[in-house]
Amino acid sequence: MKTGIFICHCGHNIKHTVDVKQLSDYFKRYMGVAVAEDYPFVCSEPGQDMIAESIEKHSLDRVIIASCTPSLHQELFKDLLKKSDLNPFLLRRVGIREHCSWVGDDINGNTEKARRLILAGLYSAAHYVPLEEKRVDVVKTALVIGGGISGLSAALFLSKMGMQVFLVEKEADLGGHVRMLKDYWPGRQDGAAVIEAMKEELQARSNVEIFTSTTIRAFEGSFGNYAATLETPAGERRIVAGGVIVAIGFTAFDPHLKPELAYGRDPRVMTTLDFEREGKGLSLPAKPRVAILHCVGSRDEQIGKPYCSRVCCINALRVADAIKEQYPDSYVESFYMDVRAHPKGGEEFYEDTQEKGVLFTRANVAEIIPGNEALIVRGEDTLFNEPFEREFDLAVLSVGMSPPEDNRHISSLLKISLDKDRFFLEAHVKLRPYDTALKGIFIAGACSGPKDIEDSINHGRASAVKLFGLLNLGYAFVDPFISQVFEKRCSGCRMCEQACVASAIKYDEAKRVVRVEEAACMGCGLCVSTCPSSAVTLKGFGDTLLDEEISAFLEAI
Amino acid sequence: MTAEKVEQNPEIIGFACSYCTFKASEMAGSLRMKYPEGVKLIQVPCSSRVDPAFIIKAIMDGADGVFVAGCHPGDCHFIKGNYFTRRKVAALKEMFDAFGMKERLRLFWVSAAEARRFVDKVTAMYNEIKELKNAGKTG
Amino acid sequence: MRGKRVSSASIAQGLNRFLEDDRHLLLAFEKDARGVNLRAFKGKVEGLSLFNPVFSSNSALYVRRMFAKGTEIVLMLRPCEIRAYVELQKLSQMEREGIVAVSVDCFGAVSSKDEATEAPREAQAEKGLFRDFTHGRFACMTCRERRGVVGDAGVRVDKEGGLWLCPYTEKGEGFASLFEGETGETEAEMLPEGASPPEAEQFNTDMAAFSQDFSKCILCKNCKAMCPVCYCVDCLFNGDDYLPKGDALLNKVLRAGSTDLPQGKELFHLIRMFHVSQTCVGCGACEEACPQGIPLTRYFKGISERLQGLFSYLPGRSLDETLPYVTFLEEELKDAED
């Protein structure tokens, strides 16, 4: 066996706290290692070339790359092996960045840890065998959960690319929150009209089936073959989809959670969404005094909402603008922490609003007290460090975005994770913001975190494109890490069969042994840990392999 | 001259499931959170892959502590795997308890977003085991 | 408890009726000039002994891998042996149809290795069953499952020493119909009167004591060979993973450093302890077979009882009770998490 070990500096991300030179020197002399090199960026083109040359020069049959965490650049390195005529499953990744250099400060401790990690990789790679990627047929249909702006965008894109789409919406109407916006910024667009147009376009398309007033009762399957049981008004319906886009939007922050603001106790306190609905019909005095509060339900550690909701500053500006439009002599004061008018044209909008005479006071509002004559807003001006108390006829709370109310339900149905704020967790915040940890399940729109309408539309389209790419060929390759039975060792006790969650193990009455149904096997390895005689193994994660990994870590091998 | 006792550092082996705990450990790395170098992770597809025989062997090979970490019950990517993990690890803990070494085996549920929780759990375990080791109660 | 009033004679009679069909077999104890032995009877039964006061092995060991169909076998054995048989059934290690398991009340046994004992070495008439059994094996003295209440039927002994055949399943009912006797209700309290099971004490030890106790182990693996529920046809320890041999051993020593030989005995026992923890019936066959006199019963029975207790599982109690490690409850073991 000839193993090559390639240790990445990752610029100075690894090199900074791990002595890569010492490591490559150490492994150069290690038995069974044909070559050991360290290199600035192994993922770079010259880095890859260096590895390819090494594979050829030393006739390597195992490649160990010690670099960033295994899930990054995996396809890149597997392709590298393929191009060098080596089975891609003879590659072993060792994570010495996220799991070593970035989590420790002491160079000696880190280097020793990296040495052990690479040693463990070396011993486990010795057990790797060439594997063929499992080819599965995938169904070229998509399930889009949520008929709001991002779900509609995703569905349209998918349909136009030729994919059958099932769009499921739990309300009676499509459109989510956008439907109720009367003139959303910047173009002063009518949300309902935008939604209607999209809805008409979708309904006219032959490859789209829309379910409203529908929920999802059950969900199962794996990438390429998911099956969802829908509860529709017409009864139960089972659909099969190759992939899923979760676009269930957000819930507006409920100001009842901040009782000091008197929301719900006095009709003169309303949210920006309430204002959207009732604003024009409000009966206010001729020169109304209006308070607008920013960051209600956002940037608030006390109630467990530390994040910024991105859209509420622009919303607040819109309300200020609308009041000034309707009541030119009004007194409008916005209480803010920061004004984050980030979209294109936002800063200009902010300036225009100020020019219209809207006052901006940097403050922490402590409470709103409903008085008989007026609302009393009490707080602290944070620029002048002075408390204040002022009277208003109307207080509009610019509420933030909270996670959608079905987040836990969908999360546990589909087995996708939630992040610390309980929005859906993306696979990687920068590199894979539309993917979830599960292949074939994507997220779009505000359900993955606060975003405005533009971003939601783009997010929906991006997820659609990614999903299309996965399913378009009608087949896909999945990792071959499934279980395998060694008949000669099997006692036929059937414990693995009883345990198997996927019902992928079947008993052969005649031979009195079990066998694995490859198509159903999910690759969890439960059967392997259940079997006392190691008669069943999990490809890539066998008992001997893991035992040696442990021993290598402890230098007891 | 009095010989100063050198403080020994424990060796901790942890099994982390690919879909939850390992992801949390990756995030911990991305966020540059620090935890002791003595903690070494072995990636498994599911915490249910962990065979108690590994854990016993790890202890016999010199590990001062072992932990098994996976998704919270009900959230397992393989749907029910971690319920089985819980049974086997609870049983092994009972066995370790009978041998007076209960603290050397731990079970954590850490979801993919819980980088801080991961770091806190392994650091606490490391510190407790370090104390035990230096009091001569492990290995 | 409902049963049929029987006697040694009527039992033998009924069994002979069963053995008329020469595809029928009986596995039970027999007394002859040499003493009491396990015997497989065909055709007819002579010298039947309901009790065997000497323990050399757990008889369930011998029914493993019997899969031929078309025979009917009656097992008339000790409770620990029937319990082991039930566990083997759960593990599909024996044909299910046509086997009738009958457990007989047990009064304990002495070890077959114990030459010096004054305890009775012959089975006596039911009324003279030995009392004050202080020379019994550790496994028997600490046994809390001496009553013949497992399997398809049981032979119970009442306070007066009378015998009852009590069916527990449909199969047992069919079996009981072979015997003549009046049906009635009995309390079936075992002799000696007032003998209650010993209090369960939770097993506790430490690694130092364990190391000391097992230092004599020569890795002959007799304990594994004689354990009725150690059923693997190709044991994990046959390979080189945990107990390397030959060049594999050489390589291990060269890489890992100085090591005691035989290497891996503690690992062997600890892993085996966990593996059998689901199904161990505490019979002590392991200790019986150990040439070095290691107190295996204390460890294996002790650990198994603790682990089984976690899941309220009793091996052999019922065929319908699922093995603990292949099932779960969604809400349980909240303390397991750290």
Image (spheres, rainbow, N blue to C red):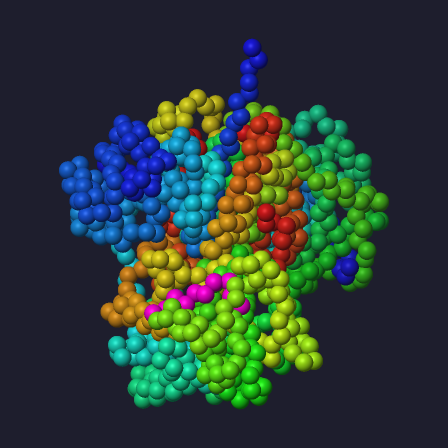
Instruction: For residue A393, say whether it is visible.
Output: yes
Q: Is residue A92 above or below residue A274?
A: above
Q: Nearer the viewer, residue C196 or B90?
A: B90
Please state if A337 lies on the left or on the right of C105 as rendered.
left
Q: Is residue C6 magenta?
A: no
The residue sitting at 72% across, 45% down in the picture is C144
Q: Nearer the viewer, residue A118 or A496?
A: A118
The residue sitting at 25% across, 52% down in the picture is A76
Which span of residues is magenta-colored? A335-344
Residue at far top of view: B1
Assign the N terminus of chain C to one quadrant of the image: bottom right
Expressed as whole percent of the image width and height from the top left, the position of residue A71 reads: 34, 52
Instruction: For residue A294, say whether it is visible.
Output: no
Please state if C291 lies on the left or on the right of C179 as rendered.
left
Q: Is residue C88 above or below residue C217?
A: below
The residue sitting at 44% across, 77% down in the picture is A356
Please state if A303 lies on the left or on the right of A418 as rendered.
right
Expressed as whole percent of the image width and height from the top left, the position of residue A179 reads: 44, 83
Q: Nearer the viewer, residue B48 or A161?
A: A161
Q: Is residue A181 above or below residue A498?
A: below
SS majority, magenta: loop
Expressed as whole percent of the image width and height from the top left, the position of residue C323 reads: 57, 54
